[in-house]
Image: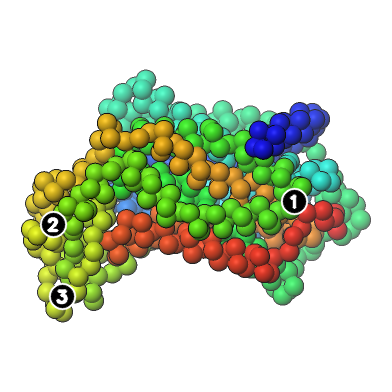
Amino acid sequence: MASNAIDAVGKHAAGLDTSHRRVILASSLGTVFEWYDFYLYGSLAVIIGKQFFSGLNEASQLVFALLAFAAGFAVRPFGALVFGRVGDLVGRKYTFLITIVIMGLSTFFVGLLPSYGSIGVLAPVILIALRMLQGLALGGEYGGAATYVAEHAPDGKRGLYTSFIQITATFGLFISLLVILGIKWTLGDEKFNDWGWRVPFLLSSLLLAVSVYIRMQLAESPVFQQMKAEGKTSKAPLTESFARWGNLKLVILALLGATAGQAVVWYCGQFYAMYFLGTTLKIDATTTQLLIAGALLIGTPFFVVFGWLSDKVGRKPVVLAGCLLAALTYFPIFKAITHYGNPAIEAASLVAPVSVIADPANCHLQINLTGTQSYTSSCDVAKSYLAKRGVPYRNVATQPGEVARVDVGGHMFEAFEGTGLAKADFAAQGKAFAASLGTALDQAGYPAKADPARSNYPMLLLLLTLLVLYVTMVYGPIAAWLVEMFPTRIRYTSMSLPYHIGNGWFGGFLPSVSFGIVALTGNIYSGLWYPVAIAAMSFVIGLLFVRETKGVDISA
């Protein structure tokens, strides 16, 4: 069945004329940029922390590097408002020509930016400014690309045409992975960490040049041209989109009943899975990246398959089926990933179970979205270390005010109260605590890293591919669904905001939220409750309140 669908899609794709191919290619390049930069920055966060935040201690370097990363997500919805409005007032073509130039230059200049050691505090300030500029541009990029392609697509093929935008997201990730691995292999780790990390950012200039050249050759969307000729363009897109309940209700439903669920399935299936393999299961970084790349390579054609399928059966059934499958199967899939990736964790937790004995009032939900919170209580110190080590544990309440202890198979280790300690003292006590507890965990059989001889890589690849297939189900048809929900005069503005709140906030903060839940509960799978709950919410709201849009007249 899947083979027949791919054959059918291939025939349709082969039938695209030259002008339609150019429209899809030009529009999709922005998504390539988006995910190329996303993966570069995420993968190189530790190096970037050392380069631009070297005035801080090692732990704070990573926190602030991730804070700069998060800044790009935080401003996306504001970019959606700014550029969405411009796109509905001026036109689709020129707006997303501006956004891709801003995106591309921001990525390129990260590669040129002097380090903290060269220009001091100005380095991190400029870095965060570049991230925010890119986030603003991204807020306008996707809505423009999706709208432009959909308004060129023939009736009955909008799902197929817009799915090519989605497929390039994975393409951008895949290219960035190959570039990182290739440069590391060529230069070696030492040179790469010193200056070679800049090369992937600088190479983005080639992608920028191609993107701008192709987009310069395009004409304006025919639907927008007709609307402009008839004098029907909106004079106040923001007011019409968000100050009038009829359209605002659609925006809210698009967010809660579609993009929020799509976002968490997307981020969980690729980024949280990568985090889980590397951080929780301690599988080495190169193997993790290759496994994720393999799953992406296998799953990528299905973005187009499910986009095409949505032209036949509707957008709603395909996207909501992906949300439902994810909500129902994430827990068994991730437990199977542990079993095949690092079975020593399972074995150790049975032989030498770990408990954190602490005053519950002293334990906090460690979700640090801004990078400004500090978690220094004895309970937080103990739980943070165990969560980062990937050790499952149970919680045992003790008397109020007592210092937290960690029980490893009957051997007790007392944490320390870090609140009020000077940074140097906190770091010294943390290092001593980590050393003693780490030794005990090693002796109890909790692996410091996965044993490659015991990892079943074919099964891991199969499970990761299944997660990617869920991604393709929710992401393939989403652009067509969003475009068809809103009238032409305010389409760019209206669809951009729910997409970027969904993907920038609900999806972008998934790793931080999930880590906090894991650290609080001690269950290495409990972080999955966040994507499961959001996916289930979108399934219910989408099923009950969001209409099917396949076949609507988008020129209205």
Q: Quadrant of residue 460?
A: top left
- Residue 331 position, x and y percent, is 42, 55
Rounded to the nearest angstrom, the CA distance separating label 1 from label 3 is 56 Å
Residue under label 3, please give it: 398
Q: Is residue 414 left or right of residue 255?
A: left
Q: Residue at left 43%, top 42%?
A: 41
Residue under label 2, please give it: 408
Q: Is residue 221 left or right of residue 453?
A: right
Return the residue nearer the eye: 329 or 529: 329
- Other-residue count near label 3 (Cα within 10 Å), few / some / many at <14 / 14–19 / ≥20: some
- Do callouts 1 and 3 mark residues in contact (Cβ within 8 Å)? no
Return the residue nearer the eye: 218 or 249: 249
Picture disc at residue 233: none
Amino acid carrying mark 1 in the image: Val
Q: Secondary structure at mark 3?
A: loop
- Other-residue count near label 2 (Cα within 10 Å), few / some / many at <14 / 14–19 / ≥20: many
- Residue 415 position, x and y percent, is 12, 62
Q: Secondary structure at mark 2?
A: strand
Rounded to the nearest angstrom, the CA distance separating label 3 from label 2 is 17 Å
Residue under label 1, please give it: 313
Q: Residue at left 46%, top 38%?
A: 462
Q: Earlier in the sequence, mark 2 or mark 1?
A: 1
- Rendered-image quadrant of the C terminus: bottom right
Rounded to the nearest angstrom, the CA distance separating label 2 from label 1 is 54 Å
Q: Residue at left 42%, top 62%?
A: 529
- Residue 105 position, x and y percent, is 54, 39
- Do callouts 2 and 1 mark residues in contact (Cβ within 8 Å)? no
Amino acid carrying mark 3 in the image: Thr
- One can see residue 307 in this view: yes
Q: Earlier in the sequence, mark 3 or mark 2?
A: 3
- Rendered-image quadrant of the N terminus: top right
Amino acid carrying mark 2 in the image: Val
